[in-house]
Amino acid sequence: MARTATAAVVPEVGAPFALTGVTLDAPRPDEVVVRLVAAGLCHTDLSVRAGKLPSPFPVVLGHEGAGVVEEVGYRVTSVVPGDKVLLSFTSCGACGNCLAGHPAYCAGFLPLNFGGARADGTGTINGADGRVAGHFFGQSSFATYALTDERSLVKVAPDAPLDLLAPLGCGIQTGAGTVLNVLRPEIGSTLAVFGVGAVGLAAVMAAALGGPSRIVAVDVVPERLELARELGATDVVDARGPDVAAALRELTGGAGVDYAVEASGNVAALRAAIDALALRGTCAIVGAPAFGTTVPVDVNGLLGGKRIVGVTEGDADPRRFVPLLADLVSRGALPLDKLVRRYPFVDIEKAVLATERGEVVKAVLTFE
């Protein structure tokens, strides 16, 4: 059946979030209604609001949801009402990459996650003045209830702290997955992380689990660099310096770093990350600047076996990877609590402002 909810609607590009009453469509056979307990605020949400990433408007964003299953379609088998779940991105489940265990590279990733509607073009949310774009990452979790794809759901333990684990669905999965699933740094290697917000710090924490003997955090915010040290970075570099790549080469005796994670979305940082690579080094691009952004690269500089790879969602299958991250959090091996600050849902604009000012690493909205 259809269900009413309170949602944080963005009416047009650049507009503030406005708490508004909406109506959710009745769940289809493969869909689930989730009562939200918490939702992480991600820079992707803010980039879409600012018009840097594609979306129709008005729209309900939010893609790090966590809550309790309220209703399931008759084909849903992975969860039942009452289950606690985390929400992540959606995928078709049928293309070659999905079938090969790489749903983050689903052939339909962009339309399914950013198109504002289901795959067949039908909407999931209506407001008083008509249709509101939804289905963001298969969920649109900036609302008291979300109508989600089953493929967006990850079941967690009945005692799971949802207000802590919500960011696992995107930001933490992306940073940790980039290190653990894509780069897989060898023991004794060196790894640099450019931009130590939530994604970058997740990469630092994942690297600290083992492998690299040297983990370098690069940022412009001193407090973030100190937090990176606390979470496992062995060295820090202030990106306000004149030549970051040179500073990294100096730290490594002139060799450069074996691995780099660019998580800031800053073009200058990406160029520095590429320039700082050692022979046969790999740079993983994680940060997402505005569509159409380019960066100049010295082609001859890459001929020493250097590689540049783009990464979405840590190349993770959430249904397998997110439970592993949740287990690491529960055992204290992934100290996510050092990143999270909670805000009531009604204070979403305060959370946005604190995020944009760099006052908080990961804001989590709470609904209870």
Image: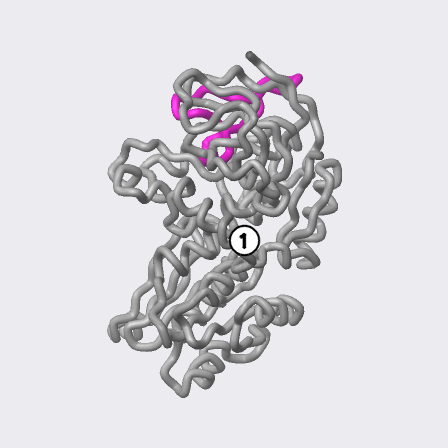
Quick check: 264 left or right of 249?
right
- Does the rendering let one see residue 11? no
Is residue 112 magenta-colored?
Answer: no
Residue drawn at 49 percent across, 20 percent down: 72
Q: Which residue is mark 1?
A: 329
Residue drawn at 45 percent across, 38 percent down: 89
Residue type at mark 1?
Answer: Val
Residue drawn at 41 percent across, 40 percent down: 319
- Residue 36: name its quadrant: top right
Question: Residue 209: x, y in percent?
Answer: 45, 65
**Most foreground residue, 260 or 148:** 148
SS label for mark 1: helix
Magenta residues, as a range? 113-137
Question: Residue 12: x, y in percent?
Answer: 62, 34
Quick check: 54 left or right of 145?
left
**Most foreground residue, 53 or 108:** 108
Question: Residue 347: x, y in percent?
Answer: 75, 40
Up-down relation of residue 225 to residue 69 (above or below): below
Quadrant placement of the N terminus: top right
Is residue 133 magenta-colored?
Answer: yes
- Residue 285: name its quadrant: bottom left
Up-down relation of residue 7 to residue 356 (above or below): above
The overriding secondary structure of the stretch rendered in magenta is loop
